[in-house]
Image: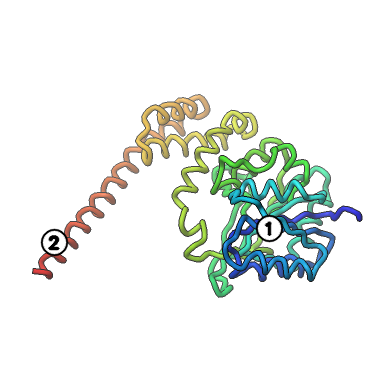
Amino acid sequence: MSAPLVSIVLPTYNGSRYIRQSVGSCLAQHFTDFELIIVNDCSTDDTASIIEELGRQDARIKIIHNEFNKKLPLSLNTGFAQARGKYHTWTSDDNYYAPDALEKMVAILEADPHRDLVYTDYSLVDEECHVFGTRTFHNIYDSFTDWLGCGACFLYKEEVFRANKGYNPGAFLIEDYDFFMRAFLQFNFYYLPGYDLYFYREHPSSLTSTQGDVVNDLAKIMIERQMTGLEKKLPPPQLALLYRKFAVFNAVQKNNARKYRLYLGKLWDLSRRQAFVTVLYVPLMKLKHLAALSLTGWGAFLRLCFTKKKKH
């Protein structure tokens, strides 16, 4: 049996509510030369029976049942260990593709051998599949500090996965951002702007809704871990913006004087004007945060006073 051109991995845990739609969007692709590897991470709902049923209906589906709950990064690695495609991607059990998603991304990679990874934006949908917004990920070559990762709709060469040695289990919650940032240091990306190829579901139990602040902090930790590589990869103007962003973050949000001095020093070596602007900007942001915190405190205090009086 010949290998497919594309391997899609679909990790799932208790995904019974939406997984039929997610799998269905894969099977409905105009581009048909793919395999779909579903990794069931010890679901306790009806997920296992649903995917087994779907697997009997289409030979392109392969199902893996984890023997223990591995979490997302290791489940991805388990799925891709079985992948045979030239190109790899993965999707979530509550999101879904437009029918031409694979077709368009494959065409972009096939058109130029120097392209290693293609990514695009997506539309946001609610629990009932109503589109209520979009998310833009930006061209990483235009501005690294504006880049939000490769999102959830992407396709990359198998060697990208191999060079990265898979997804990092220590990067749980931001395993995709960490993977793409490490890939950026070695491979060529292609940004495809547009919102019509993928639909990302945000609902009360989604990670985006429940772990937003944690994810942002973890992303900054992962960037710092790759700072040496980024210093070699990024042009000076983008590197200066990155240093400025980290100087402000550590001064205003983390109150970390040591790291503030570190990044201010790095920024000084690249752009004294940017360093000067940062020194002026940080106290203003500190005052803004202090004022917002004070107003929050007074608001809570007054509400408590009013509530107590009403009870008496």
Q: Earlier in the sequence, mark 2 or mark 1?
A: 1
Residue closest to the eye, 55 or 307: 55
Relative height, residue 92 to residue 72 (above, below): below
Q: Name the quadrant containing residue 254.
A: top left
Q: Which residue is mark 1?
A: 10
Which element carries disc 2, helix, strand or loop? helix
Residue closest to the eye, 151 or 23: 23
Q: Name the quadrant containing residue 54.
A: bottom right
* Residue sitting at x 32%, y 41%: 286
Q: Quadrant of the C terminus?
A: bottom left
Q: Which residue is mark 2?
A: 305
* Residue sitting at x 64%, y 46%: 74
Residue type at mark 2 is: Cys
Q: Position of residue 218 (x, y in %)?
A: 50, 43
Residue closest to the eye, 106 or 243: 106
Instruction: Work out whether residue 141 can be spotted.
Output: no
Q: Position of residue 65 (x, y in %)?
A: 68, 56
Which element carries disc 1, helix, strand or loop? strand
Query: Which numbered marker is on residue 225?
Result: none
Relative height, residue 35 to residue 56 (above, below): above
Q: Position of residue 46 (x, y in %)?
A: 61, 68
Residue type at mark 1 is: Leu
Give the alpha-carbon distance from disc 2 to disc 1, as whole Å. Answer: 52 Å
Farthest residue in the front direction? 67
